[in-house]
Amino acid sequence: MTKPTILVVDDELSIRESFTLILENDFTVETAASGETALQKASSQSIDLVFLDIRMSGMTGMETLPKLKQMHPDTPVIMVTAVNDVQSAGEAIKNGAEDYIVKPFDVDEVLKKAKSLIERKRLKTEAARLGTGALLAATRPAIFGRGRRSEELREAIRQAAEGTGPVLLMGEAGSEFDDVAQNIHLESNRAQKPFEIVRYSPESREFSAQIELFGQIEGTSLLSPSPSPGAIHRAKGGTLYLSHVSQMPGLVQDVCAQWLDDDGRPQDVRVIASWVNRLPEDQAVSALHPTLFEAVSVISIEIPSLSERLAEFDGMVEDLITHFAHKHHRKEKKIGKEAIELLEGYPYKGGMMELQGIIENIVLTLPQEEISAEDLPLDVWIHSRVGGKIPYSQFTEKFEKLFLEHAKQIFGSNTFTLSKRLGLSPTALQAKLEHHHLVEDSAI
């Protein structure tokens, strides 16, 4: 049986040799001393996993990452970082990396992450071979919450899955529209068929939106003269999910409504649409044409907002912490009472998706096993209705660290150059960097 292949990318020979010693018994190990060499190797062979150093001379790990993901979108990448640069690692994960490890790394941790991610990739590949439905089932999203409103949402999903008519999902910005749509599909008798997504935005244009939905026949466009199937055709037998349907151009809304009302239409497709129908008072809700609203709302589900689920907020946060700890192979963390109160008092303009983003970032970047109030983002401290409980000294301490991290990203890590740009003496700046654990061996 052929061993999976791991590519190790680091400009330090000793690090490459260490990875090779750790991994070579279980995997075929390829190494690269630069981002450029890594891309050359990745373009000529199949890679199952990549360990990628963030800070390298020449092309950095952050610059190499998107190019690697473009070549091998399904290949997991683990970033390798110094202890004082976990913020960059968190940013890399937002841009497609799967995880990160900190130098000096633990042998067991490296092997555990490598085996786990390669096995996950194998399962996804097998699911893709079996069909779209199996692929979705392998990555099925959870609906978080233990209280009455969340259970009502799960029951609405079950009932919608048993039906056959179009479904309209409604809620505030940042509601878990995509997760609910996928769960309806996966609990229905179409679960093994395609789940096709079309997303709309204020930039959606009439001509391209109509072609994306209905396709085009040969010669109908000078820009794209070849025939191409639309999303309706690609979703045949399965589910077509229209995300933010109210931002579909007006004429296309009318055409779509006519298609949905055509009982004799040949395509066997179920439609699920999402509509942000609740926004803050200073923002206007995108209009959904009455004919399309009537056509897609045969079954309607109102997704409860976070403010409507405050009675179950504590358990929801704990479940999110557990979920992201498992997803990113981290130890589970506890969260302090004051941190929970601050999170509960924050006005989530981005809804559930904003809460999930906050928790995921904390789980990824926090080394200790308990989340305290000081570990929360500054925005939470400032805007939470219980933010006054945070001592001023803690606020300024965290702000100074974030400011210095941002300054290093802009001006570089050389202490002398950085001190001139910030108007500080090199000695004073060095003391602050050491205090916040932001010093790099080669930065002086």
Image (cartoon, rainbow, N blue to C red):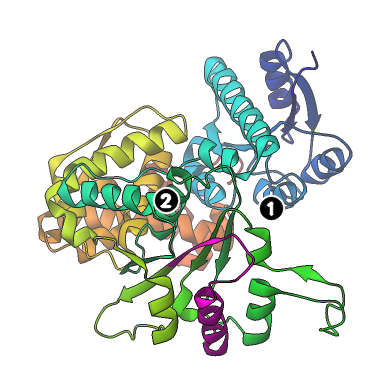
**Mark linked to residue 36:** none
In the depicted view, which residue is nearer to us: 158 or 41? Answer: 158
Local crowd at mark 1 within 10 Å, few (<14), some, or many (≥20)? some
Residue type at mark 2: give it.
Ile
Count of numbered badges drawn on the protein? 2
Which residue is label 1 attached to? 66
Could one spot residue 231 in this view of the protein?
A: yes
Identify the residue at the far front of this view.
264
- Quadrant location of residue 306? bottom left
Identify the residue at the far bottom of this view.
251
- Report the quarter where the N terminus lies: top right
Looking at the rendering, the stretch of residues picked out in magenta corresponds to 249-273
- Quadrant location of residue 98? top right
Could one spot residue 202 in this view of the protein?
A: no
Residue at the (55%, 79%) spot, across then down: 256
Residue type at mark 1: give it.
Pro
In the depicted view, which residue is nearer to us: 234 or 122? Answer: 234
**Mark linked to residue 184:** 2
Mark 2 or 1, nearer chain start: 1
On screen, residue 87 versus residue 223, left or right, reads left
- Quadrant location of residue 292? bottom left
In the depicted view, which residue is nearer to us: 215 or 209? Answer: 215
